[in-house]
Image (spheres, rainbow, N blue to C red):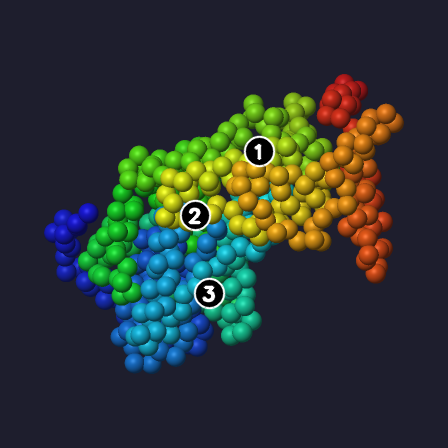
Amino acid sequence: MKVSIKEIGFNKTDLEIEKQVIEEIKMAYSNDERPWIIGYSGGKDSTATLQLVWYALSGLIERKKLVYVITSDTLVETPIIARYLEKNIQNINDVAKKQGLPITAQKLIPELNNRFWVNLIGRGYPAPQQTFRWCTDRLKIATSTKFIKEKISKYGEAVVVLGTRKNESDSRARVMAEKEIKDNIFSRNSQFSAAFTYAPIRNWSTWDVWKYLIRVPSPWGNDNEELARMYKNATGECPFVVDDKTPPCGNSRFGCWVCTLVERDKSMESLVQSSESWLKPLLNYRDFLVTTQDPSSKNLYREFKRRQGFVSFKSNGSGEISRGPYTLDFRKELLSRLLKTQKEIQMNDPGQNIYLISIDELKKIRRIWRTEEGDWEDSIVKIYETIIGREIIWEKDDINPFGKSDKNELVNICEKNGIPSNLITKLIDIEIKEQGMTRRSSIFSEIDKIFHEEWRSEDEVKKEYAERKMR
């Protein structure tokens, strides 16, 4: 897609605006010794911001202060965007080094315990929705928070540079206004008392951003026209997230392919309908996750107890239970579907070598199922080997001494004696977990928690609730 200067309405005012911003950046950079941390999502706003900072630094003689460029890779990014970001991070580092600029770029990934599949399939967290956006904190905020804290600890203070704009929305303008410092280009940071926020393009419009990107070439060799093509028919972008006030980005090409914060992912649909039909299996999986949020189907997929073992009724007095995590059986289905989707993607586009879930994540999920969910059958091993057709070398300390036949025997004994088999399974799992520990005092509190969980059936719990309401 070729876009000429004439077509985008370029004029001399644009040069003046750009010059003013670059001069402001130079002044802000030279003003103190605090390092800068630039949030880079690969979208238009963060790209324009990084370009402006780059050109500003190129015009300075003294460039002693470090500039860190960080991007959050959730590990469930749309594959096209993941490759785009990987290429740009590499180019930023290579070109900055050649030009002698104090700019380094790196990709931040969630800790294993926070990753999407570990929580969705491992722990049964339901697919994210507006009222429970657990993904934003675990996949994005946690990674950027850790990085910023490390730099604050090292340097005392830091400046977080973001591509946020007042023109984005009324809510964005309001949040930015609340954090402004009078007569200062820096704003207070909502997360860190020892950090400040700087938004060089805070007063730009969307059109200002595009005119700048099309007119001014990327200093690290990015193709801004390719960026424009990626935005064609898209409905937005995922900004770099450092707090919980950033809006969701479900309609964006610059986001996660599993995003269920919107009913339809129009950007992914557009990709599939145009030149990227090989992504259809990903869209199908995402759309299936969305169906699990339908109130009429929640009972099919989710436990009636919360993860902590208690039952919660909705406050509207309807007697309806607020459902808990996905059932273990349904999580097995989710894993099977995911591995089949991965296999289909690899067959459709064999040159991409795409893996939707890592071996480390599979091993972590297996540990959760084995130690917290009573999966004595070791289901994950069978599921993986059946679908993928090869074995994984599992750690020996993952091996539970009991198997499927032991679980069947336990269930039979419990049924004869009117005891919940899951209760006994949990007690045995706690003993296995604590076995060999030098100090075992914590086992008593763990046992106490288990006995305080709800072990009656859903019908029994609902009956008692109804009787209480009638009194």
Q: Position of residue 152 (x, y in %)?
A: 53, 69
* Residue for badge 2: 354
Q: Amino acid at mark 1?
A: Glu
- Nearest the camera: 75 or 126? 75
Q: Residue at left 50%, top 56%?
A: 109
Q: CA distance from mark 3 to mark 2?
A: 38 Å
Q: Residue at left 42%, top 49%?
A: 353
- Nearest the camera: 315 or 362? 362
Residue 214: image quadrant is: bottom left
Q: Secondary structure at mark 2?
A: loop
Residue 45: image quadrant is: bottom left
Q: Amino acid at mark 2?
A: Ile
- Nearest the camera: 350 or 195? 350
What label does residue 432 carry, if any?
Answer: none
**CB of mark 3 within 8 Å of CB of mark 1?**
no
Indicate whether 344 appears above or below 43. Answer: above
Q: Circle 2: is it few (<14), some (14-19), or many (20+) Cα within 10 Å?
A: few
Q: Position of residue 196 (x, y in %)?
A: 46, 65
Q: Is residue 243 visible?
A: no
Of callouts 3 and 1, the N-terminal one: 3
| Count of numbered labels shown in the rendering | 3
Of callouts 1 and 2, the N-terminal one: 1
Q: Is residue 36 visible?
A: yes
What label does residue 333 carry, if any?
Answer: 1
